[in-house]
Image: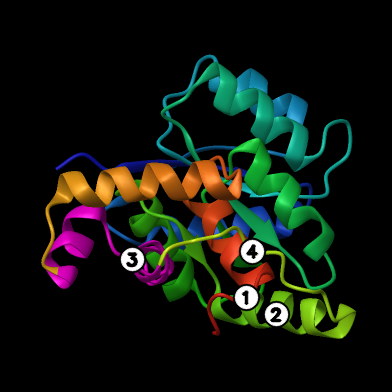
């Protein structure tokens, strides 16, 4: 089985070094490279094969949002997980819009980072539960009114299953419907909510109080 190749993009060398040691300790992972800003990240991608990128949001020269946007355009198969800190909620939507598939807090346990990498590598999306809690608290504090799209009962059921991290096939089995039907509903959900991907759908559901964490 091929190892999952990971690039770390963060402007703090000590953090990169520690994360690299921890990730390389897993037999299925290999840190293929590390960089300190977005420009270096785009350069290393040209010569380094990678499956996953762990991307800091705030970096000099070029931040994680712009680096993610450009990288995904250049390498559509690359999956990016944002490395986040508290207080960066304003960037989450920008990162999702840029193409990020998941978010983990920088002070997360390495076991959670491993789970995020494995989940996203399989095609899923991953959000730190603690991070989601802070997003919800921020939304509640603003007392944002829900302006949810007119979703059907079935669409809401499927959206909930998506937020639970289930694949289309798993959703089909859980709801006793065909995968083709789930595919159609997911496409409708993306269209109705103006979401680009699964991560965007999850944030939409939280923002519009369609799910509770």
> CB atoms at circles 1 and 3 under 8 Å apart?
no
What is the crowding at mark 2: few (fewer than 14 residues within 10 Å), some, or many (at least 20)? some
Give above or below for 113 relative to 60. below
Where in the figure is residue 171, as x and y percent of width and height?
22, 63
Give above or below for 185 relative to 205. above
Q: Residues in magenta?
A: 153-175
Estimate the spatial distance between the alpha carbons at disc 1 and disc 2, rounded to whole Å: 6 Å
Estimate the spatial distance between the alpha carbons at disc 4 and disc 1, rounded to whole Å: 19 Å
> CB atoms at circles 2 and 3 under 8 Å apart?
no
- Determine if residue 32 is in view: yes
Left or right: 210 as drawn, with respect to 182: right
Please report whichever mark, 2 or 3, sits nearer to the chain's N-terminal start: 2
Estimate the spatial distance between the alpha carbons at disc 2 and disc 4, rounded to whole Å: 16 Å
Please report whichever mark, 2 or 4, sits nearer to the chain's N-terminal start: 2
Relative depth, front residue between 125 and 61 = 125
> CB atoms at circles 4 and 3 under 8 Å apart?
no
Please report whichever mark, 4 or 1, sits nearer to the chain's N-terminal start: 1
> CB atoms at circles 1 and 2 under 8 Å apart?
yes
Where in the figure is residue 134, as x and y percent of width and height?
72, 80
Where in the figure is residue 127, as x and y percent of width and height?
53, 66
Q: Which residue is mark 4?
A: 148
Estimate the spatial distance between the alpha carbons at disc 4 and disc 3, rounded to whole Å: 15 Å
Q: Which residue is mark 3?
A: 154
Q: Which residue is mark 1?
A: 132
Relative depth, front residue between 116 and 94 = 94
Estimate the spatial distance between the alpha carbons at disc 1 and disc 3, rounded to whole Å: 24 Å
Q: Which residue is mark 2?
A: 136
> CB atoms at circles 4 and 1 under 8 Å apart?
no
Mark whose residue sits in front, 2 or 3:
3
Numbered disc 1: secondary structure: helix
Residue drawn at the location 43% of the way across and 32% of the way down = 50
């Amino acid at each position: 089985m091929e190892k999952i190749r990971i690039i770390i993009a963060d402007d703090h060398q000590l953090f990169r070094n520690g994360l690299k040691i921890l990730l390389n300790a897993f037999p299925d992972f290999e840190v293929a490279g590390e960089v300190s800003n977005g420009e270096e990240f785009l350069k290393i991608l040209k010569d380094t094969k990678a499956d996953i990128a762990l991307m800091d949001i705030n970096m000099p020269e070029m931040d994680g949002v712009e680096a993610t946007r450009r990288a995904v355009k250049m390498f559509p198969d690359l999956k990016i997980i944002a490395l986040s800190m508290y207080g960066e909620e304003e960037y989450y939507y920008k990162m999702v819009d840029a193409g990020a598939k998941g978010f983990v807090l920088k002070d997360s346990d390495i076991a959670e980072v491993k789970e995020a990498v494995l989940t996203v590598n399989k095609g899923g999306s991953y959000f730190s539960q603690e991070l989601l809690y802070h997003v919800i608290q921020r939304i509640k504090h603003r007392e944002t009114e829900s302006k949810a799209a007119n979703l059907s009962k079935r669409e809401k059921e499927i959206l909930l299953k998506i937020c639970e991290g289930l694949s289309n096939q798993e959703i089909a089995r859980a709801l006793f419907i065909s995968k083709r039907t789930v595919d159609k509903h997911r496409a409708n959900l993306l269209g109705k909510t103006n979401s680009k991907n699964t991560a965007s759908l999850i944030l939409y559901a939280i923002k519009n109080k369609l799910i509770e964490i």
